Amino acid sequence: MTYSHDTVAHKRVVREFAEYLQGRIGLEVHLDQWADGPRRDWSLWAVANLRDADFVLVIASPAYKRRAEGLAPPDEGRGAQFEAAILRDHLTRNLAAGTERVLPVVLPGGSVEDIPMFLTPYSTTRYEIAEFTEREVAYLISAITGESAHTAPERAPWRGGLESAASERPRLLLAHQERWLDSSDDFATGTARIEGVPYEHSLLLRPAATPVEHSFVEFDLGFGTYQELIATAGILDDAAERFQTGRIEVALDGRLRLVETLSWGRPVRVRLDLAEARRLRLAMYRPAPAATPFGGGAGGLSGKPPELAWGDPVLR
């Protein structure tokens, strides 16, 4: 661990960090504050540790940066200037290996601006530690162990690029009620005719009474099984009141991703990328007419039942 003796407080924080890494995490840490018993040649001590250590943690601070970049007088922080010169030489000799081995660390209260320029703080990884906890040091430990904090899943068979490949994806008809996680009570399934086209596997919203707010159906998408949602939403051709207005909403993992307004003869074609979503929610309702200067309309929901449908909604 290389750092500069900026202040007594800074030295204490560095020591506490070293104690945490060795006493709690289980790393073997070499720190000058633990080696100040016998009289020694500190330059040789630094050379040996910088040469033999598997990783070197550079603790960022204003004084260390100034000394590492040659902006301090020669009699200021000679140890930090000496160690930084060795690290610069190490990086110049083999940049790729040095980048993996020399790890810039920003401790609580520090700033990325305190990292010396030769460690390229903005174009390479840095390790900002807000507090001494396992969560905060996880990425630093990943750099030391070589094991990512997040494990990548096994690669699935290639599905991208061509329409023929897309057609081979597993398809799920959302009208199959056994796949529903949750729903309001006013949805039914069956054939919907929208603008003269029959959709045999549809979600029908045709409540007999005053509708509830945002009639919905929810589905569990699993993980990476489905790539997109395809559907046609519209007002039913046999609606008793053709010139009503409907509204559809699509939410992924609780976040609203699509809102569209339906009108007679103008269905909405939905093709939505599901990305990495795990939960899908389809909603339909009939909004109240917009307010007018004469007092008509009040926002919210219409008091009249909607006659809407999701035509053949499919996941693939």
Image (cartoon, rainbow, N blue to C red):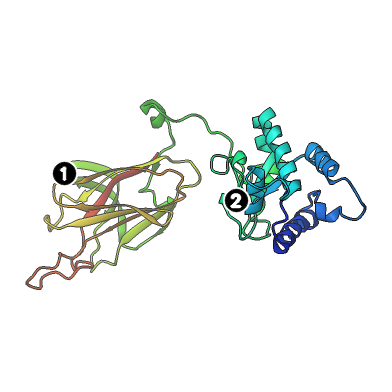
Furthest residue to the left? 294
**Contact flag, marks 2 and 1 (Cβ < 8 Å):** no
Furthest residue to the bottom? 295
Give the class, few, some or many, for how many residues have Cα within 10 Å of label 1's Cα (few <14, many ≥20).
some
Please report the residue visible at 59 percent of the width from the left and 42 percent of the height from the top: 117
Viewer-closest of 7 and 249 = 7
Give the class, few, some or many, for how many residues have Cα within 10 Å of label 2's Cα (few <14, many ≥20).
some
Write down the quadrant of residue 24 in the picture: bottom right
Task: Please give left or right for residue 96 compared with residue 281 in the image.
Answer: right
Write down the quadrant of residue 195 in the picture: top left
Q: Secondary structure at mark 2?
A: helix
Q: Can you say whether 169 is above or below 121 in the image?
A: above
Viewer-closest of 232 and 107 = 107
Task: Please give left or right for residue 148 compared with residue 22 in the image.
Answer: left
Viewer-closest of 194 and 107 = 107
Task: Please give left or right for residue 218 compared with residue 260 in the image.
Answer: right
Q: Percent from the top left, x then y, of residue 82?
A: 74, 42
Give the residue type that dot 2 points to: Asp
Q: Percent from the top left, x then y, of residue 130?
A: 62, 59
Please report the residue visible at 68 percent of the width from the left and 36 percent of the height from the top: 88
In the image, which disc is placed on residue 44? none
Nearer-N-terminus badge (2/1): 2
**Residue 94 in sight from this viewpoint:** no
Q: Please give the residue where the numbered disc 1 appears in the rendered image.
A: 195
Please report the residue visible at 61 percent of the width from the left and 39 percent of the height from the top: 118
Observer-side mark, 2 or 1, equals 2
Give the residue type that dot 1 points to: Glu
CA separation, marks 2 and 1? Answer: 65 Å
Q: Secondary structure at mark 1?
A: loop
Q: Please give the residue where the numbered disc 2 appears in the rendered image.
A: 114
What is the count of numbered marks? 2
